Amino acid sequence: MTPNFVEVAHPPQNQPHLIPAAPFRRGSDHDTTISLKNVGLSFKSAKGPQLVALDNINLEITPGEFLCIVGPSGCGKTSLLHQIAGLSFPTSGEVQLNQRRVQGPGTDRILMFQDHGLFPWLTVAQNVEFGLRMKGVPKPERRDTVNRYLKMVQLLGFKDNYIHQLSGGMKQRVALARALATEPDILLMDEPFAALDAQTRDMLHDELETLWTRTGRTIVFVTHNVREAVRLGDRVVLMTFRPGTIKSEYKIDMPRPRHIEEPAVAALAGDILGELRTEIDRSHQAEYEAEHQ
Amino acid sequence: MNKLLKNAIFYAAIAATWVIIIRLHVWPTYVVPAPRDVLQTLHDGFKDHSFWIAIRVSLRRLAIGYSIAVVIGGVLGLAIASSRFLDDTLGRLLIGLQSPPSACWLPLAILWFGLNESAILFVVVMGSFLSIAISVKSSLQQVPNAFRMAGRNLGAQGWRHFFYILLPASLPHLVSGLKQGWAFAWHALITAEMLYISLGLGQLLMTGRDLNDMSLVASVLLIIIAIGWSVEYLLFRNIERTLHRRWGLVPA
């Protein structure tokens, strides 16, 4: 009988030898610039008028950038991510990759979900392998890649476990390994650590940062946690509530690695939070009005 | 072990009550047969192969009828799940058609096919394919959006999306639906077999009635219950449990 729940002991962080040599993509011809041009999204709500979820979003994300998007819930940040992934489309404007319009999903852009989206009918290794299998990568090569990325997230010992046997943090690490296994140029992360406890989250921040530094992939990271955004991002974009627009942008020049409890991080996060507050208030107001109509 | 013991005591108590009722001559044996007579009938029936033949004939019909129902139900369920239009039209019709008990299809079957094998199969198929179609449809529709999106995102498109994402994601629900369809098919079969000299278990039950042989009726009932129970609990329940455990739907 396999144990229902096992927590793995985390080895000390920032040990470079744990990170396998993944192809270094910064400056390679895989570089992809993401451009959002006048992106809008509106739909007819069940009752009442047209709902404008996104309005006139213009944003350029350079190759290798770590961009964080913050905003109140319902501001359309997830929609934006799905549009970059090609899983949904804007109703006006367009999303481009190297000046070419996104027409559908592709393994060059992998999305990580808040609730991990791992397949419970597959083992950890099979989950990580999935994208490669769909690509038609031969089995021995697949196995090597899977082992490499499972080692990176320190879950090689759990490769034959099923998803429900893992803790929340372990699941997110498997999801990260699965996302990285197809070696995408762009990693799209939709509040990936929101459901985790603070310790696990901090640890995953470190791992993600190390990994990003090593591989130079573009990361678009959506969160409602401002400190998390400042801790991780090169740039933080703040979105408004309905219609979702870009309210302001912050360049984060602090040296890495940063820590979420650092005073400099907290101070900058405080500034951004002040602006975010008004948007959160507006979202609460809208919620209240919807309830009392 | 504890569960087994409890059940052993429970069934021993039922058997004892039965014996006592017979000993006290509460009811005549043509109303409540003696355990000894039932055992004797079971013994004779299996020995002269008449029970084996009935079981074989019934299970063969069930296998054919259920397979047809699974194919039709599967195709319809898939079609309804993938088209909003079909869901709103055909889907609703199927739910409506499912409401009458399978016995209602008997007169229709006789008029269409006559008293023959086809009529029985028709009733079995009618009794089960609707519920299978509906559960296939709802199992597929229940697949969480996160799985669909993750699948497409990782490059599973078209038939691969169906085989590698939708099918496994809906498997636990699908098996429950197939189990229910099986139970409906089994019920419909026994009903349909009472129609005419059909050799099956249903007919054997009617023979018991015609001959006023209560121990035969009780024996066949026991066989029907035993088969139904075995398939439902030993086969389907175990598959369901395994799937639920592996999919993490219940604590292991």
Image (cartoon, rainbow, N blue to C red):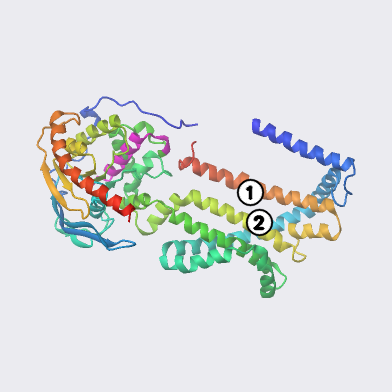
Secondary structure of the residue carrying numbered label 1:
helix
Q: Which of B67 and A133 is in front in this view?
A: B67
Q: Quadrant of residue A151?
A: top left
Q: Which residue lies most toward the bottom here?
A: B111
Using the rendered view, name the quadrant where residue B190 is placed. bottom right
Which residue occupies 74% across, 38% down? Answer: B11
Q: Are marks 2 and 1 in contact (CB under 8 Å)?
A: yes
The residue identified by callout 2 is B186
In-image side of A95 versus B3 (left or right):
left
- A188, above or below B8, in the image: below
Q: Where is residue B135 in the image (x, y as percent from the top left)?
A: 51, 57
Left/right placement of residue A86 relative to residue B195 reads: left
When the figure is inspected, residue B171 is found, relative to residue A193, above or below; the finding is below
Q: Which of B100 and B73 is in front in this view?
A: B100
Under mark 2, the amino acid is Trp
User: Relative to the observer, which residue lies in front, A210 or B92?
Assistant: B92
Which badge, 2 or 1, is on the more N-terminal residue?
2
- Does any portion of residue B165 appear in the rendered image? yes
Q: How crowded is mark 2: few (under 14 residues within 10 Å), some or many (20 or more)?
A: many
Give x and y (percent) for residue B84. Answer: 41, 65
Q: Is residue A167 magenta?
A: yes
Type of secondary structure dominating the magenta stretch: helix
Residue under the image location 49 percent in, 68 percent down: B90
Decide if residue A127 is on the left or right side of residue B133.
Answer: left
Q: Position of residue A52 (x, y in %)?
A: 23, 59
Residue tagged by mark 1? B231
Range drawn in magenta = A164-186
| Chain ID at mark 2 | B
Q: Which residue is drawn at 11% across and 38% down?
A: A252
Of the 4 image quadrants, the one containing the N terminus of chain B is top right
Q: In the displayed structure, does residue A161 sit left or right of residue A110?
A: right
